[in-house]
Image (cartoon, rainbow, N blue to C red):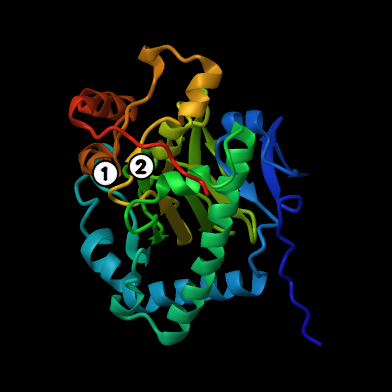
Amino acid sequence: MHRSTRPNCGRDKIRYASKKGGAWRVEKASKLDEEKVKSEAIKRLINHGISHELMDKVETLTKEHYRKCMEQRFKELVASKALEGVETEIEDMDWESTFFLRHLPESNMSEIPDLEDDYRKAMKEFVVELEKLAELLLDLLCENLGLEKGYLKKAFCGSKGPTFGTKVGNYPPCPRPELVKGLRAHTDAGGIILLFQDDQVSGLQLLKDGEWIDVPPMRHSIVINLGDQLEVITNGKYKSVMHRVLTQTEGTRMSIASFYNPGRDAVIYPAPELLEKEAVDESQVYPKFVFEDYMKLYAGVKFQAKEPRFEAMKAMETTAVTPAPIAIA
């Protein structure tokens, strides 16, 4: 008889892996521990509530799609030419093959060419589960911060609600990994990021205390990362994390990264309740801005430090709109 391997999911069921003393261990928490979130920043969820059968199906179909529709194109356009005559590291390209899916406020799944029906169906089912998980995690962060439940989700809502999309990436083997990164170092611009990565081929690293730390593959886990917008809303209590992907000489690394972000016209600013609690000096307050304006800036400086972006947005505040209080009810 078939038995489901769907893990339990709930506030007291979420389990996550954290790195301590060089070893990964699984912990249980009724809520995400604030100090661990701030110190570890990128976490891996184990009991996230998403069926293992569904994850396996999505992984299989993603890899099949790459082999059938994208691998040869990458070999012809990139792998055969990009490293010719190169002896120093390339700083203006990434060794990756990607496509993007949009889910909210409107889906573009039907518009993506070459996706087979069973792949579309599996991805639709998968992202529904990811959306639920993202919203649960946002509420756990609200609990940690002492904010009313639903505050962060509401803060992400523009006139059409939040935006939610997925970058499906493959990082093919590279004959000269010292010359090019799979993905250059950056912080993510948005809100909360849920990553389903290859459980065999490594490459993801995060920057902590000035050192690059591996995030090793772990089967059926979801890697959680926080983006720049959560750093702004929490006024730096939670930080976005610099991360990168290294190339490997063998194996193609799969990466399915889903971004739960503010709506384009959402006004982003530090939660007033947090500023009042901490009695933050005005010079230490993060800027307020329209998310779309931040993304326009980010597009040109993605692979640079985030602090100048925040400063640039602060300089624009004289023309920014004054935020209204966020109503939860």
Is 110 on the left or on the right of 47, as rendered? Answer: left
Give the residue type at disc 2: Ala
The Cα–Cα distance between marks 2 and 1, rounded to whole angstroms, is 7 Å
Foreground residue among 150 and 19: 150
Please tell me in which quadrant of the rendered image residue 313 appears.
top left
Q: Secondary structure at mark 2?
A: loop
Q: Given the current orientation, which residue lies at the most extreme right position?
A: 1
Q: Secondary structure at mark 1?
A: helix
Q: Residue at x 41, y 36 (%)?
A: 325
Foreground residue among 171 and 39: 39
Foreground residue among 329 and 261: 329
Q: Residue at x 37, y 25 (%)?
A: 286
Label 1 Cα crowd, 10 Å radius (few <14 / some 14-19 / many 20+): some
Foreground residue among 147 and 96: 147
Which quadrant, please, contains the N terminus?
bottom right
Query: Could you tell me residue 142's position as x and y percent?
Result: 58, 40
Q: Is residue 12 visible?
A: yes
Q: Is residue 307 above or below residue 282?
A: below
Query: Could you tell me residue 19's position as x and y percent?
Result: 67, 37
Residue 189 is tagged as: 2
Query: Could you tell me residue 307's position as x and y percent?
Result: 33, 25
State which tag comes first along the sequence, 2 or 1.
2
Is 36 on the left or on the right of 280, as rendered? Answer: right
Q: Is residue 246 visible?
A: no
Residue 295 is tagged as: 1
Q: Is residue 34 above or below residue 315?
A: below
Pointer 2 with pointer 1, Cβ within 8 A: yes
Q: Residue at x 68, y 35 (%)?
A: 33
Query: Could you tell me residue 84's position as x and y percent?
Result: 20, 51
Give the residue type at disc 1: Met
Is 284 on the left or on the right of 28, as rendered? Answer: left
